Image (cartoon, helix red, strand yellow):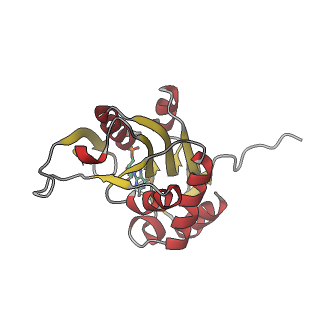
């Protein structure tokens, strides 16, 4: 999606070698217009599927997942990363490893909000090693539901998650696909490739 790629080029910062910081429009301050365009694009891609719910992970996935759910006119559910007194009813729980925080964490969804009749579109801000997505897929499976597709804002294609999940048969649509970082610059897939005349 060109608007997202342009924004990443303008405002993204490569830190710690392989982390893209997008706090200026996605992970801290939110560009609401861009978020709605991104939601519409993912909706257009999956609009022929019978999606009943959009599922994401707090906090960074919420904005884009809400935009997607808005166009599908279905509820958006976000998995919670911490236990709280309000999450006292039975929950589905699964475990993931955080690449950016370098630690394991649990994700949970109240059993009232995912069921065997759901066809779930999973949405997240980044796909790197696929841990977050695998934890969300596991929650849908525990509920007996079906994964109707996966929509990602930014896929780091040089990390293994996307390939592994596609090999497992999941359909992943990513709005921006990063091939790598070179001297602090973002290189998208298809860029800087030798052209055949
Ligand atoms: P994965 O579980 O696929 O390894 O990583 C996905 C999660 O880690 C995303 O939900 C995102 O929050 C975080 N993440 C992974 N790579 C990056 C990155 O380069 N930049 C930012 N801002 N977050 C990332």
Q: Quadrant of the N terminus?
A: bottom right
Q: Is residue 15 above or below residue 118?
A: below
> Residue 190: horizontal and vertical position, in percent?
69, 46
Left or right of 188? Residue 85 is left
Q: At 28% from the left edge and 33% from the top edge, which residue is drawn?
A: 142
Residue drawn where x is 41% and y is 48% of the image: 53
Q: Residue furthest right?
A: 197
Q: Quadrant of the C terminus?
A: top right
Point 28% across, 40% down: residue:
96
Quarter residue 74 falls in: bottom left
Residue 7 position by quadrant: bottom right
**63 in relation to 145, above or below:** below
Q: Residue at x 14, y 48 (%)?
A: 89
As displayed, is residue 177 above or below residue 171? below
Give the x, y percent position of residue 61: 40, 56
Query: Where in the figure is residue 95, as x and y percent of width and height?
Result: 25, 39
Q: Nearer the viewer, residue 151 or 2?
A: 151
Q: How many marks?
A: 0
Q: Is residue 178 left or right of residue 56?
A: right
Which of the two residues, 161 or 54, is positioned nearer the viewer here? Answer: 54
Residue 110 visible at all: no
Residue at the front extreme, as displayed: 117
124 or 23: nearer the viewer: 124
Q: Is residue 131 visible?
A: yes
Horizontal and vertical percent for residue 146?
42, 34
């Amino acid at each position: 999606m060109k608007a997202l790629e342009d924004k990443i080029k303008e405002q993204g910062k490569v830190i710690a070698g392989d982390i893209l910081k997008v706090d200026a429009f996605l992970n801290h301050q939110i560009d609401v217009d861009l978020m709605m365009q991104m939601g519409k694009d993912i909706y257009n891609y999956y609009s022929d599927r019978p999606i009943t719910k959009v599922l994401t992970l707090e906090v960074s996935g919420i904005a884009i997942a809400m935009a997607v759910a808005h166009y599908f006119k279905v509820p958006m559910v976000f998995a919670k990363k911490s236990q709280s007194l309000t999450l006292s009813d039975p929950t589905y729980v699964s475990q993931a490893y955080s690449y950016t925080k370098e630690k394991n964490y649990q994700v949970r969804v109240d059993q009232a909000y995912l069921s065997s009749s759901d066809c779930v579109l999973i949405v997240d801000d980044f796909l790197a090693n696929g841990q977050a997505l695998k934890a969300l897929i596991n929650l849908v499976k525990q509920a007996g539901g079906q994964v109707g597709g996966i929509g990602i804002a930014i896929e780091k294609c040089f990390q293994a998650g996307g390939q592994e999940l596609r090999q497992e048969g999941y359909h992943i649509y990513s709005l921006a696909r990063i091939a790598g970082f070179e001297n602090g610059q973002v290189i998208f897939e298809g860029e800087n490739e030798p052209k055949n005349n």
